[in-house]
C-alpha cells in the first residue's frame, strides 16, 4: 500500500511538472507567429512568404530585405529583449520584496532614468527639433542620453540598496525608499522642464515615450549582453526565491542568506532595467503586469514562474509593439502608451485586492 501511494504521488508530481513545462512551451512557440506578424505587418505590408525567405537568406525581393533586416527585425528583437528583461526583473523584485506591487517602474528606477535623460538635454543639447515647423525630435547625441539615463538609474538602485543595508533589507524599507526616490526624480524632471525652452521640452517629452524603433543592432547587442547573464542568475536562484516566499525566517532556517540575496537581486534587476530603458525610453508596467498574468496560469513556483515571465514578457511587448504600429497606421504609436493602458487597471486591481486581504 505504501509503495502504491508513493507511485501515485510520483505520478502526480510528474503530471504537475509536465503541465508547467507545457505552458512554457506554448509561450515559446507563440513567439514564432508573433515575430512573423511583427515583421510582416505595418504601413508597408510584407507578404509572409517574403518575410520567411528574407529570414532564411533565400532569394527575397530587395524591398522586403530592407524592411525586414533594417527596420522591423531590430525593432522586434529590441521589444523581445526589453520585455523579457523587464518581466523577469519584476518577478524577481516581487519575490525578494514579498510585495505584489514591486517592479522597476513602481520603485522609481524608470523615473531616475527620465531625469538623467532630461538633464543631458539641458546640459549638452543631446536632442532637438530639426526644423522650425516642428516634427520628430532628432537625437543628436544618443551616447550622452544613454549614459546619463543609465547613470541615474544605477544611482537610484544604489540608493535603494544602501538605505536597505543601513536600515535592514526589509521589503517595507525597499518599497518606501523606491516610492520616495520616484517622487524625488519626478520633481527633478519637472524642475528641468520648467526652465527648458520649447525645443528642449519637446526633446524631454520625446525621450519619455518608450519606443523600440529607436534601437540599433549595437544597442540590441548591449541589451542582450546584460539581459542574458542576469536572467540566468535569476533562474539559478529559483529555489532560494521559493524559500523566501515561505518567509524570511524559514528561508534562513534553510540556509538562505536572505539579506544578501535581496540586495544582489535588487541590484541585478535594477541594472537590467536601467540598460533597457536607457536605450529605449520608459516602458512602464511590463515588469508589474506580466509576472501576475503568468502566476495566475503557472503558479508561484519560481522554477517555472521566472522562465515563463521571461518568455511572456518578450511575447507581450512584441505583440504590443506590433499593435502600436497598426492602431494609428501610417502613424506609429509609442508602445509605452499601450503598456500603460494595460498596466494601470492591473495596478489598481492589485491595490484593491490587497485591501480586501
Image: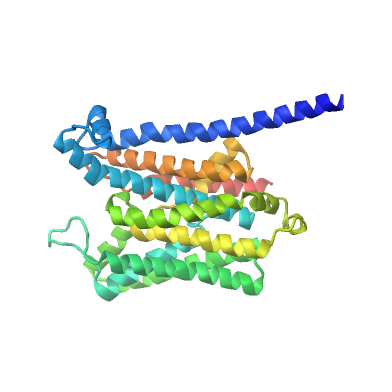
Does residue 94 lie above or below 49 as drawn?
Answer: below
Q: Residue at x 57, y 69 (%)?
A: 161
Which residue is more in the foreground, 206 or 290? Answer: 290
Q: Is residue 245 left or right of residue 228?
A: right
Percent of width and height locating residue 204: 30, 64
Q: Is residue 215 something that shows in the picture?
A: no
Quadrant where the N terminus is found in the figure: top right
Q: Is residue 10 left or right of residue 145?
A: right
Which residue is more in the foreground, 47 or 108? Answer: 47
Does residue 42 lie above or below 245 as drawn?
Answer: above
Q: Residue at x 37, y 47 (%)?
A: 79
Percent of width and height locating residue 281: 35, 57
Which residue is more in the foreground, 170 or 101? Answer: 170
Percent of width and height locating residue 332: 26, 45
Q: Is residue 110 left or right of residue 261?
A: left
Q: Is residue 325 left or right of residue 338?
A: left
Q: Residue at x 50, y 56 (%)?
A: 230
Percent of width and height locating residue 277: 39, 58
Amino acid at each position: 500500500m505504501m509503495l502504491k501511494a508513493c507511485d501515485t504521488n510520483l505520478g502526480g508530481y510528474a503530471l504537475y511538472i509536465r503541465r508547467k513545462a507545457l505552458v512554457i512551451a506554448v509561450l515559446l512557440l507563440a513567439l514564432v507567429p508573433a515575430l512573423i506578424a511583427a515583421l510582416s505587418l505595418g504601413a508597408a505590408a510584407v507578404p509572409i512568404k517574403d518575410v520567411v525567405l528574407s529570414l532564411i537568406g533565400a532569394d527575397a525581393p530587395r524591398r522586403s530585405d530592407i524592411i525586414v533586416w533594417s527596420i522591423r527585425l531590430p525593432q522586434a528583437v529590441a521589444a523581445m529583449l526589453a520585455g523579457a528583461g523587464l518581466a523577469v526583473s519584476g518577478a524577481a523584485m516581487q519575490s525578494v520584496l514579498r510585495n505584489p506591487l514591486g517592479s522597476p517602474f513602481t520603485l522609481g528606477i524608470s523615473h531616475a532614468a527620465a531625469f538623467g535623460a532630461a538633464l543631458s538635454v539641458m546640459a549638452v543639447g543631446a536632442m532637438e527639433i530639426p526644423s522650425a515647423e516642428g516634427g520628430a525630435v532628432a537625437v543628436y547625441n544618443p551616447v550622452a542620453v544613454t549614459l546619463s539615463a543609465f547613470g541615474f538609474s544605477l544611482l537610484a538602485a544604489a540608493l535603494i540598496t544602501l538605505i536597505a543595508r543601513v536600515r535592514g533589507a526589509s521589503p517595507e524599507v525597499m518599497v518606501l525608499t523606491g516610492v520616495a526616490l520616484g517622487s524625488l526624480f519626478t520633481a527633478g524632471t519637472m524642475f528641468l522642464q520648467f526652465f527648458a525652452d520649447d525645443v528642449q521640452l519637446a526633446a524631454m517629452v520625446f525621450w519619455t515615450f518608450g519606443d523600440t524603433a529607436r534601437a540599433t543592432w549595437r544597442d540590441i547587442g548591449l541589451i542582450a549582453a546584460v539581459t542574458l547573464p542576469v536572467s540566468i542568475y535569476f533562474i539559478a536562484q529559483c529555489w532560494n526565491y521559493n524559500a523566501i516566499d515561505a518567509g524570511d525566517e524559514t528561508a534562513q532556517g534553510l540556509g538562505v542568506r536572505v539579506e544578501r540575496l535581496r540586495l544582489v537581486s535588487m541590484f541585478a534587476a535594477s541594472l537590467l532595467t536601467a540598460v533597457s530603458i536607457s536605450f529605449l525610453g520608459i516602458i512602464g508596467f511590463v515588469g508589474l503586469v506580466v509576472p501576475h498574468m503568468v502566476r495566475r496560469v503557472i503558479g508561484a513556483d519560481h522554477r517555472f514562474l521566472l522562465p515563463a515571465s521571461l518568455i511572456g514578457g518578450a511575447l507581450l511587448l512584441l505583440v504590443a509593439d506590433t499593435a502600436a504600429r497598426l492602431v494609428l497606421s501610417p502613424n506609429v504609436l509609442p508602445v509605452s502608451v499601450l503598456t500603460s493602458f494595460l498596466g494601470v487597471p492591473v495596478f489598481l486591481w492589485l491595490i484593491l485586492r490587497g485591501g480586501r486581504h
